[in-house]
Structure formats: structure tokens, C-alpha cells
């Protein structure tokens, strides 16, 4: 079965950077779009970024545009989220998700589109 394992979370000061990774197994990676969502304490899970199966298109939530970069390495079955200029409000559990689709990233921001989720990695940004 399809499995996703996130890593790279941790504690960082405001203004700092982190790179999250998500390794996928049990699938033909190039058939799947990948996404990152996040959930802050006491809040709903929200969309962060998504990337098409080829990596040719990406899409970001407005609050993350310009600070976060999603990328993928199809030779390693891995998707990344580079997070720069982190703010305390970025504190959340970050989840990787995947869907078997060839649609462009701009159409893939809805949480209920995704079939498989990782367990998440905690990111804490101190002020």
C-alpha cells in the first residue's frame, strides 16, 4: 500500500529556515501529485503547497507564497518543502499527501482530493 513518511521538522527561531521531506513508497511516484498541508493547534488543517506529478506546476497558499518552495525528486520518490522566513504563526504539524492524477497543481488545493496521508512532522517557530 501507499505510504508517506515525513521528516525534517523541528524547533527554529523566527526568520529561520527548515526543509521538510516526504518519502513515498508503494506507488509509481511519477503518477502522483504531491501536496503539503498543515494543522496548527486548535485550528483546521489547511493547504500549504502542491506540485504536479511531473513537477512542472506548483501552487501555494497565499500566506506561503514567496516564502515556501515545494519541489520533488522523482528519482528518490521524495517531495520537499523548503520553508524560509519562518514566522511563529507557521507553527503546526505539517502533513504530506498524495493523489494519483495528472491534473495541474493549481487544481489540487482541496484537502478532500487526497487519498493518502503521512503522519506529520512538527514545526515550531519561536519568537
Image (cartoon, helix red, strand yellow):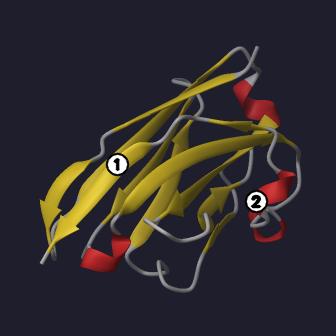
Quadrant including the N terminus: top right
The spot of residue 62 in percent (x, y) is: 56, 86
Q: Earlier in the sequence, mark 1 or mark 2?
A: 2
Q: In which quarter of the image is residue 75?
A: top right
The one of 37 and 50 positioned closer to us in this rendering: 37
The answer to whether 119 is drawn above or below residue 69 in the figure is: above
Residue 1, compared with residue 68, is above or below; it is: above
Judge from the rendering whether residue 13 lies leftward or rightward of residue 90; answer left or right: left
Q: Mark 1 points at which residue?
A: 122
Q: Which of 1 and 40 is in front in this view?
A: 40
In the image, taking residue 66 as reference, residue 98 lies left or right, namely right
Residue assigned mark 2: 111
Which image quadrant: the C terminus? bottom left
Instruction: Give the percent coordinates (x, y) of residue 103.
Output: 88, 56
Give the structural element (helix, strand or loop) at label 2: helix
State yes or no: discs 1 and 2 in contact (Cβ < 8 Å). no
Residue positioned most to the bottom: 62
Q: Which quarter of the picture shows residue 77?
A: top right
Q: Where is residue 115 in the image (x, y as percent from the top left)?
A: 82, 39
Residue at left offset 70%, top offset 62%: 57
Q: How crowded is mark 2: few (under 14 residues within 10 Å), some or many (20 or more)?
A: some
Q: How far apart are marks 1 and 2 (CA)?
A: 19 Å
Q: Is residue 87 in view from this perspective?
A: no
**Residue shown at 80% from the left, 47% from the top:** 114
Where residue 18 appears, x then y in whole percent? 26, 55
Q: Is residue 24 visible?
A: yes
Left or right, 35 with respect to 68, comes to right
Of 43 and 97, which appears nearest the observer? 43
Q: Which residue is drawn at 43% across and 53% down?
A: 93
Amino acid at each position: 500500500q501507499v505510504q508517506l513518511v515525513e521528516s525534517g521538522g523541528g524547533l527554529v527561531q523566527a526568520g529561520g529556515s527548515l526543509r521538510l521531506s516526504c518519502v513515498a513508497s508503494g506507488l509509481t511516484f511519477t503518477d502522483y501529485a504531491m501536496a503539503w498541508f498543515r494543522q496548527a493547534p486548535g485550528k483546521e488543517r489547511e493547504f500549504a503547497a502542491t506540485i504536479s506529478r511531473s513537477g512542472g506546476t506548483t501552487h501555494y497558499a497565499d500566506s506561503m507564497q514567496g516564502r515556501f518552495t515545494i519541489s520533488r525528486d522523482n528519482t528518490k520518490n521524495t517531495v520537499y518543502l523548503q520553508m524560509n522566513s519562518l514566522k511563529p504563526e507557521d507553527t503546526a504539524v505539517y502533513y504530506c499527501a498524495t493523489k494519483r492524477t495528472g491534473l495541474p497543481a493549481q487544481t489540487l488545493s482541496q484537502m478532500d482530493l487526497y487519498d493518502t496521508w503521512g503522519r506529520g512532522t512538527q514545526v515550531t517557530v519561536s519568537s
